[in-house]
Image (tube, rainbow, N blue to C red):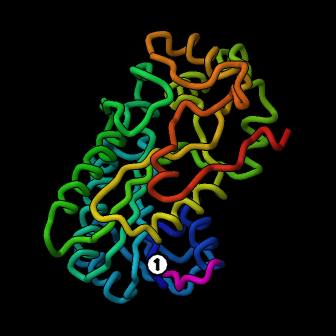
Amino acid sequence: MPESVAVTGGNGRLGQHVLEHLTAEGYRTVNLSRGKRDEAHSDAYVRTDLLDAGEVYGALAKSDPDAVVHLGMIPTPDHTPGYRTYESNVMSSYHVLEAAGELGVDTVALASSFSAIGGGFEPDPIRVEYLPIDEDHRLTPSNPYAMGKQAMEVAADGFARRSEDAPETITSLRFPWVVDDDLARETFVETDRTLAGLRDSEHFHTQRNTLCGYVHAADAVTLVERAVEASFTGHERVWVSAPDTSAETPSADLTAALYPDADYRGPTGDDENPYAALIDTTKAERLLGWEPTWSWRQLV
């Protein structure tokens, strides 16, 4: 089992949650980030430009981790030129995978995204063939952020095919929007989450294009820990989601209204969880022993 973990982007919102959790669980943690330290959870901090191959190699060598969690990428495409957004996702991940392989780090977890499917930040409505989506669903990204996430996953496939100088275990975690209690209360509980309310919201396009998906930070960090502890060989992609949607409309009805061309394979109104997520996390459960437990409805 790994004893030390380097977390890139530990200054970020998710990164801080991950460092806090892993440190509390007894791991020695190192934050690899640009700029000055902006968290108080890690055991060590190494200032690192993740787009510089030499700095990544040197920072990992200095940190001497057993595993790497790579979160240090531009989180949205809104405030940077397209090529910078793409470069951040693709090249930083390549540098991390290459340095980890050369230094004998066996395990790497990569922050992929829901956007890889061709949703999220896409200007057009998402195209889904069936719901809930799983890892077999086709990917049709077109914006720089989403294309970068897909390219990152393809690069991880390539490293996994190497017979040497590559991590043994690589997991791409396709995160949706990550919330904490305050953000969930503000966004979900204090607004109208019925289908009519969603349609009236200025964020309707984004909600529709992310399948009303989300995950709570508490579940996200548990999944990261499971990926750090994973022992499979090769590269695997896993979808991440809360157990339900962020909508107050049953998932069958939500699908019929917003994704009428999709083959709906989820629960109906008579099932125990009629609001079940439109993102299938069965593979994460099977491969990593992870199940999401936190729902925004428990705040109501």
Q: Is residue 285 above or below residue 161?
A: above
Q: Quarter-wise, where is residue 235 in the image?
A: bottom left
Q: Say how many tags the image has.
A: 1
Q: Residue at x 39, y 69 (%)?
A: 231
Depth order, front residue of 21/121 = 21
**Which quarter of the image is occupied by the C terminus?**
top right
Q: Quarter-wise, where is residue 135 in the image?
A: top left
Left/right of residue 230 with respect to residue 90 in the rendered view: right
Q: Residue at x 34, y 81 (%)?
A: 60
Q: Is residue 239 above or below residue 68?
A: above
Q: Residue furthest right?
A: 300
Left/right of residue 224 with respect to residue 300 in the rendered view: left
Q: Residue at x 48, y 52 (%)?
A: 286
- Disc 1 marks which residue? 5
Depth order, front residue of 2/48 = 2
Q: Amino acid at mark 1?
A: Val
| Callout 1: SS | strand
Residue 291: x and y in percent read 60, 51
Q: Is residue 38 above or below residue 104?
A: above
Left/right of residue 34 with respect to residue 233 in the rendered view: right
Q: Is residue 29 magenta?
A: yes
* Range of residues picked out in magenta: 25-31
Residue 240: x and y in percent read 51, 46
